Amino acid sequence: MSLIVEVNDLRKQYNPPEGVTAVQGVSFAIKQGEIFSLLGPNGAGKSTTISMLSCLLAPTGGDAVIDGHSIKNDGKQVKQVIGVVPQEIALYGTISAKENLEFWGKMYGLSGQNLKERVTAVLDIAGLTDRANDKVDTFSGGMKRRINIAVGLLHNPKVLYMDEPTVGIDPQSRRRILDTVKELNAQGLTVLYTTHYMEEAEELSDRIGIIDHGQLIAVGTQDELTAMVGQYDTVQLDVGETTEVNGTLVSDLAALDGVHQADGEGEHVVVQAEDANLVLPRILQTVTEHGRSIRRLEIQEPNLEAVFLHLTGRALRD
């Protein structure tokens, strides 16, 4: 399967040479027809990356080639083959959904019967044909998100960028958007999807890039990524202050039978174990022997959260 997106050492520093570096040497490729997700916390550099790949923000260094066109040298051609669903709602609330779509369609260069047919088609994809003539201000947050997606589809793009498309909406609307993404992909559309929701990346993605502090720290299928932490369960503990000195808690936990690794600082401790349920009683005993009280305990089987924790030393939502 051929590559449709190739990102090479992409970098962005605001106000160089002293300004903040938001993206640091990001490289990845997307195959035609796949869903590729950039997964990372808020502020990781996802939206900045999307802005550069959309030719809305000039990179400080590196380049990307979209369907054979460079974002640095062929911006006009790039914009013809991509659809962009921004994180912010890009709609006019005082006019109808249909009028919004007609406006944006004309901005894409559509006109006449072609524009009419595409507006009808994307309203159907959004499931809002019956609300076509209603003002966008009367729509729920989820409905506005769906029209936002429809705008990005008007000109039949080869690649659709979706930047956090489910932020701030109800579970039912989120479910509809995720199903729409899968349906569009099943019809052959390539999707670049950004999210800080691990569950979305797990459900949608053929491959995932984990991004943090502007750096892409891992890329692969979900199985490939979870293999990085092995077949270990993760036990996360928040423990109280020590009431007596009795050795080092983390090193004692690491020495327990069945424990692969233990890390921690202060009150937060993370233990990786072959079978969390089997080793948990010994963990609890060790914590008690160190004069600590358990304030929070969470067990996770190998997943993307465990991968992020393994690679960064902190939880995805920290």
Image (cartoon, rainbow, N blue to C red):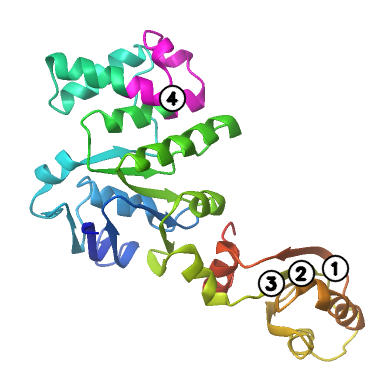
Element at badge 4?
helix
What is the quadrant of residue 215 in the picture? Answer: bottom left
Up the image or down, 179 lies above or below 298; here it is above
| Residue assigned mark 4 | 144
Q: Residue at x 40, y 25 (%)?
A: 126
Numbered range of the magenta stretch: 122-145
Element at badge 1?
strand
Q: Amino acid at mark 4?
A: Lys
Q: CA distance from mark 4 to mark 2?
A: 40 Å
Q: CA distance from mark 4 to mark 1?
A: 44 Å
Q: Residues within 10 Å of mark 3 (few under 14, many from 20)?
A: many
| Magenta stretch encompasses residue 132 | yes
Q: Amino acid at mark 1?
A: Ile
Does residue 44 appear left or right of residue 266 in this picture?
left
Residue 233 numbered tag: 3
Q: CA distance from mark 1 to mark 3?
A: 19 Å
Pointer 1 or 3: first along the chain: 3
Q: Amino acid at mark 3?
A: Asp
User: Does the image show residue 212?
Assistant: no
Q: CA distance from mark 4 to mark 3?
A: 40 Å
Q: Residues within 10 Å of mark 2 (few under 14, many from 20)?
A: many
Pointer 4 or 2: first along the chain: 4
Pointer 2 or 1: first along the chain: 2
| Residue assigned mark 2 | 237
| Residue assigned mark 1 | 294
Q: Is mark 3 in CB contact (under 8 Å) with mark 2? A: no
